[in-house]
Amino acid sequence: MIVLKDIKRSYVLPKVTVDVLRGIDMEVAEKDFVAIMGPSGSGKSTLLHIIGCLDRPTSGQYLLLGVDVSRKTDNELAEVRNRKIGFVFQSFNLLPKLIAWKNVELPLLYGGVEPNTRKKKAFEMLEKLGLSHRAEHFPSELSGGEQQRVAIARALINGPAIILADEPTGNLDSRSGKEIIEIFKGLNKEGVTIVVVTHEKDIADETGKIITIRDGVCQSGCY
């Protein structure tokens, strides 16, 4: 499903070029549940952004579902993100002035789906995650674990093939973090491919495969 071939990513600053990824080769198969681990500054988040088509590699080839996306236009990448990929972030990234179900419907809104269908699907997704009773609440009225479940519902609303999560339990207590990982495990059993960046070994151990990167190079678990 995901094939990276010699992926490099450099950032040109005024006085220096920073090489963040130095030639990543890795594969993620369909229905995998993968954790990406590595020390701070190893390139984990940069790698996830490239996998999620939020950033482009400086060089190398990225095949997503058999299609080379490393050279697609910005508009084409936006379409890939909206149709194929769901994102979950450490900071939840919910819009504070929108109640829960309106946050969940946003990808459908961007996709031009009509209002009644958007609302119906948003409530169905919140019901699936045990949050239908909180659908009319603002993010500030929800616990951290509830906010993350709303974010997961939003990530799932378009039926993506892949969920990418960047430190999804980083702002949660251990109990809420475990609940989120159990949700991911359930989604994976339903056939969703999941890639999680985490620094927590106990979280990584709950996945089916651990990829370790260091200094911008894949160290283990890459295939």
Image (spheres, rainbow, N blue to C red):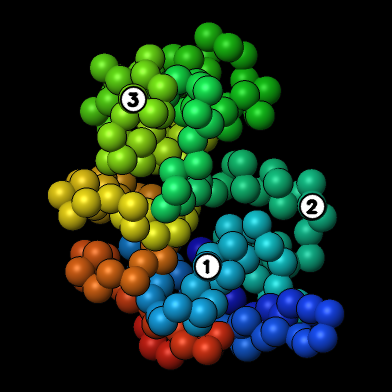
Is residue 15 left or right of 23 when viewed as pictured?
right
Please name the residue shown 62% across and 24% down the image.
109
| Quarter of image, res 71 | bottom right
Q: Which mark is residue 141?
A: 3
Please name the residue shown 61% across and 14% down the image.
114
Residue 194, above or below 60: above
The mark nearer the N terminus, 1 or 2, is 1
Instruction: Report which residue position mark 2 lands on.
Output: 74
Please name the residue shown 62% across and 87% down the image.
23
Percent coordinates x, y for residue 185 in the rendering:
25, 53
Mark 2 surroundings: few (<14), some (14-19) or many (≥20) residues within 10 A: few
Percent coordinates x, y for residue 10 in the rendering:
72, 80
Is residue 54 left or right of 177 when viewed as pictured?
right
Percent coordinates x, y for residue 14 in the rendering:
84, 80
Q: CA distance from mark 1 to mark 2?
A: 20 Å
Instruction: Report which residue position mark 1 lands on.
Output: 45
For mark 3, give the secondary structure: helix
For mark 1, give the secondary structure: helix
Is residue 34 left or right of 79 when viewed as pictured?
left
Amino acid carrying mark 3 in the image = Glu
